Amino acid sequence: MTKNICFVTDFESIEASLNTHKYLLKKLSDNFDNVYLLDSNRFKFFKKRNIKKPKHKIKKKNIKEIKINNYKDLKFFFNKKNTVILNNIGRGLGDFKLLFFFRLIKIPQIQVLNTDVVSYERTKEIKFFNIFNFIKFIFKKKIFQKLSVFFSIIGILSKIDICFTTKKYQFNRINKNYFFKENFSYIKKSVLINSLAYDVFKRQIKNVKQNHILYIDYNVNHEDTVELRGRLSKKDENYHYQKVITILKKLEKLYKKKVLVSIHPQYSLKNTRKNLPGFKINKFNTIELIKDAEVVVFFNSTVINYAYLMNKKILNLSSDILGENTKIETNIFPSRSGVVKVDINKEFNYSKKKLEKSFKSGQIKNRAFINNYLKPDNKTIGLDKIVREINKNFFY
């Protein structure tokens, strides 16, 4: 019998999903017969009408899209296939229908959480003019998720059979606390793995250079932030980018190297070029650009994990104008490591000597960050461990 994996994700963000999980999907396709892609949006309570198709051509022949639109055909498909679900969907109200279906057909599920290695709460900021959006956010991100956990515990919705996580506290809470696992978790078993960044760094990163400065752009109007804070005005957005440009220009003078800009797969190249004129804007190759950078500048991004592993000089920007939640986001890494934090609203009065001294003084904390957050499972390759556990638990 064949061994198959079905990657369930929302095709609204398919480009970003394929880019984020490309190493995982390749590893799975190398070790199992087929990897199927299933659009969860087709089966939600509240469907989005314009379903996107993957823009990236999938090079591997055994990675295929399942073009099914109803539960009857989906059940027939899974009944014929020996399949494990790789669950990449949320646990919001719209996902309940599909999670209930997975429980009915009793199909095993795994979850892989190896990119976002630190957590924070996004509910600190309330603006009275946006109280409706705040309430909607609380229901979507908090109440419905709590309900999904409750429904999983009482057997209405499916549980995750194995969660592969890089977060030590999550692993310990589930595996070392039987009472919590049985009564308060939608996860049956947790397996500790190293971060994806560590896997890629150990297996694929070679010839690290220092050719340029890299700025990883930040979405000032992220969907979740807008729901709480409201949309940043055009005036404030322009002010924000003027301050960012000022710092980037100063770094170019200090290091006598060009600044390149990298953006998230879902960001608009056109808009970023307007916001950051005169800089080369890049998409889908951030890891490669980090590899060849001397200094990496960012507000908040999970891809910064690669900069730690490559021992890059990291400058973490912050700004009060972006709101309370963004302030929390941009303090995640400085509070846990030795990156240099800079408020863009204040005078950037660093000399190169002073900046280099600040980078050097944070190296010990950065190494501790790597051990605690990026490689908590010593030197094992996380992707290899995932394959071993899938075979051991589901394809024996």
Image (tube, grey):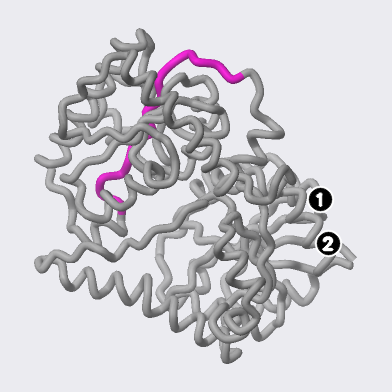
* Label 1: how many Cα within 10 Å (few below 14, some 14–19, many 20+): some
Q: Describe residue 50's horizontal placement relative to residue 396 as left or right.
A: left
**How many numbered callouts?**
2
Name which residue type carries label 1: Asn
What is the span of residues highlighted in magenta in the rendered image? 208-222
Name which residue type carries label 2: Asn
What residue lies at 65% left-to-right and 60% top-to-bottom? 164
Magenta stretch: helix, strand or loop mostly: loop
**Pointer 1 residue:** 31
Q: Position of residue 348 (x, y in %)?
A: 21, 24
Secondary structure beneath label 1: helix
Which one is nearer the viewer's eye here, 91 or 69?
Answer: 91
**Pointer 2 residue:** 391
Say which quadrant the N terminus sits in: bottom right
Q: Residue furthest bottom?
A: 154
* Circles 1 and 2: CB atoms closer than 8 Å: yes
Q: Quadrant of residue 140?
A: bottom left
State whether residue 325 appears in this view: yes
Q: Is residue 60 placed above or below 262 in the rendered structure?
A: below
Q: Describe residue 271's horizontal placement relative to residue 215 as left or right.
A: left
